[in-house]
Image (cartoon, helix red, strand yellow):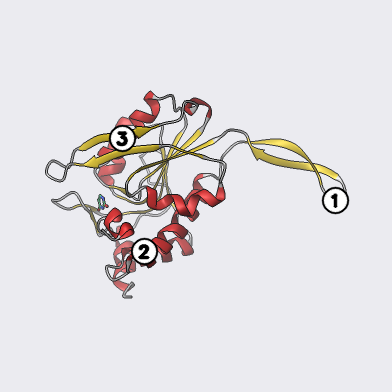
């Protein structure tokens, strides 16, 4: 696997930490995250390896995204003594945007197996690059939850903006988006439409090409994950 060029491309974007002047955007620089990112960027990574690396990377991104979740104190009886412990104060909802967002669930769900999974079906019209909603299955209790919107690619931001709109319409008030690769166009669209939605990403790439693919990106995340 040739990842050298990919790493250089990533370095050339020059983004580190919070992107100034934008809504909270956290670029996860953890070395393991960046190694998994390089692997899924590489064009010769086969689907089964792409899945494995995306699972690991999604888990690392969720680890960062969940860092500030509120906890409630509980009492725990160890075999030796009563002590203090913690549990999450609010329920979690994962909302993958179909279909590529499903590719992030396998990595994340084991960390929070009690979470509810909401599905948001939005496809991109390949001619207009505009989002088309075709399916939604959202739980009733969104207002009480911390909601994590999942999509590997934040490209034009059309799908993410529409998904966040649907989630808010259904009651969500705390939404964090987790995406593997983002770009200035998508971040700007989200900032305009949903300035309250924090974004956790592994990379802010240079921008979009004329087909609205992220460059350098990783190609079509859904195709690569599912092998179709
Ligand atoms: N969706 C993808 O899968 N890849 C891109 O580069 C943009 C949107």
Residue beneath the point at 33% across and 50% down: 100
Q: Quick check: can you spot residue 89?
A: yes
Front residue (pair 26, 126):
126
Q: Residues within 10 Å of mark 2 (few under 14, many from 20)?
A: many
Q: Answer above or below: position of 40 versus 179.
A: below
Q: State which quadrant residue 167 falls in.
A: top left
Image quarter in which the N terminus is found: bottom left
Q: Residues within 10 Å of mark 1 (few under 14, many from 20)?
A: few
Q: CA distance from mark 1 to mark 2?
A: 43 Å
Query: Percent x, y for residue 123?
Result: 24, 41
Contact (Cβ within 8 Å) of mark 1 with mark 2: no
Q: Which residue is mark 1?
A: 79
Front residue (pair 93, 190):
93
Residue beneath the point at 29% across and 53% down: 222
Front residue (pair 119, 41):
119
Q: State which quadrant residue 38 falls in.
A: bottom left
Looking at this view, name the residue that lies furthest to the right: 80
Q: CA distance from mark 3 to mark 1?
A: 49 Å
Query: Percent x, y for residue 8?
Result: 31, 68
Residue beneath the point at 11% across and 44% down: 127
Residue beneath the point at 42% across and 63% down: 53
Earlier-in-chain disc, 2 versus 3: 2
Q: Answer above or below: position of 112 versus 118.
A: below
Q: Secondary structure at mark 1?
A: loop
Q: Secondary structure at mark 2?
A: helix
| Label drawn at residue 135 | 3
| Label drawn at residue 50 | 2
| Label drawn at residue 45 | none
């Amino acid at each position: 696997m040739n990842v050298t060029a990919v790493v250089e491309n990533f370095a050339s974007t020059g983004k580190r930490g919070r992107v100034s002047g934008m809504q909270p955007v956290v670029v996860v620089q953890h070395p393991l995250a960046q190694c998994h990112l390089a692997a899924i960027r590489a064009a010769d990574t086969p689907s089964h390896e792409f899945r494995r690396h995306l699972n690991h990377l999604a888990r690392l991104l969720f680890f960062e995204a969940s860092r500030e979740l509120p906890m409630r104190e509980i009492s725990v009886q160890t075999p030796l003594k009563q002590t203090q412990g913690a549990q999450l104060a609010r329920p979690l909802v994962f909302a993958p945007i179909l279909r590529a967002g499903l590719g992030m669930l396998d990595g994340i769900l084991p960390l929070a197996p009690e979470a509810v999974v909401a599905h948001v079906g939005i496809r991109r019209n390949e001619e207009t690059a505009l989002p088309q909603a075709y399916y939604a299955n959202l739980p009733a209790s969104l207002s009480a939850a911390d909601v994590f919107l999942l999509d590997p690619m934040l490209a034009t931001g059309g799908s993410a903006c529409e998904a966040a709109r649907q989630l808010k319409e259904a009651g969500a008030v705390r939404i964090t988006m987790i995406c593997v690769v983002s770009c200035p166009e998508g971040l700007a669209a989200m900032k305009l439409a949903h300035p309250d939605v924090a974004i956790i990403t592994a990379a802010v790439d240079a921008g979009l090409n004329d087909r609205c693919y992220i460059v350098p990106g990783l190609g079509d995340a859904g195709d690569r994950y599912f092998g179709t």
